[in-house]
Amino acid sequence: METEGQFSPPTAAAARDRYESLGSTAQVVVKEVAKAMGLDAEAYRERVTGEVVETARDVLFAESLAVTVGSREEFDEWREETDQEVEVIGADNVDNVVWHAPPFAETAVAATYQSERDAAVGTLRRQAFGRIYSEVV
C-alpha cells in the first residue's frame, strides 16, 4: 500500500484555503497555455472565460490530492476500520483499489482497477472533487 499525491486536507476550511490559493496559479496556467496556442488578445478575451479558469483550478486542486493505492485485500481491511461511507466506482472482482478519505468528510471514494493504475488514480481524483470537494470549496 502506498500514497500518491501530496494534499489531504484535514478540515473543510483547509480544503477551501487550498482551493482559493490556486486561483492565481490557474489564471497563469491558462494564460500561458493560450499564449502557447498562439491566441491573440481578442481571441483570448473571447475564449478564456471565468469558467475556463475555474476548470483549471478544479484540475489543479484534484490532481494534488493524496490517494492511497493498494490491493483489494488492503482496501477491504481499511474499509472495515473506517466509519466513513465509501462510494466505490468500478468492478468488484478486480485486484487493486485506489481511495481517498478526507478526515473531515463523512464519505470516502474509491476506484477499482486491474492494471491501469494511472487511469484509476485520475478517475478517483476527479470523482473525489465532484463528490466531496465541489460542495466544500
Image (cartoon, rainbow, N blue to C red):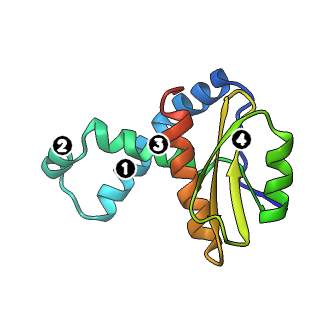
Q: Amino acid at mark 2?
A: Arg
Contact (Cβ within 8 Å) of mark 3 with mark 4: no
Count of numbered labels shown in the rendering: 4
Query: Depth-wise, is mark 2 or mark 3 nearer the camera?
Result: 3
State which tag comes first along the sequence, 2 or 3: 2
The answer for how far apart the CA atoms under marks 3 and 4 are is: 18 Å
Q: Quadrant of residue 15?
A: top right
Q: Which of these two is toward me, 30 or 134?
A: 134
Residue under the point 67% across and 26% down: 14
Q: Check disc 1 and report its element: helix, strand or loop.
A: helix
- Label 2 sits on residue: 45
State which tag comes first along the sequence, 4 or 1: 1
Residue under the point 57% across and 51% down: 125
- Label 3 sits on residue: 58
- Label 1 sits on residue: 30
State which tag comes first along the sequence, 2 or 4: 2
- Label 4 sits on residue: 101
Q: Check disc 4 and report its element: helix, strand or loop.
A: loop
Query: Depth-wise, is mark 1 or mark 3 nearer the camera?
Result: 3
Residue under the point 56% across and 62% down: 90
Specify the farthest residue to the front: 93
Q: Position of residue 82 (x, y in %)?
A: 81, 38
Dot 2, crowdedness within 10 Å: few (<14), some or many (≥20)?
few
Contact (Cβ within 8 Å) of mark 1 with mark 3: no
State which tag comes first along the sequence, 1 or 3: 1
Q: Check disc 2 and report its element: helix, strand or loop.
A: helix
Q: Amino acid at mark 4?
A: Ala
Contact (Cβ within 8 Å) of mark 2 with mark 3: no
State the mark number for residue 68: none
The answer for how far apart the CA atoms under marks 2 and 4 are is: 39 Å
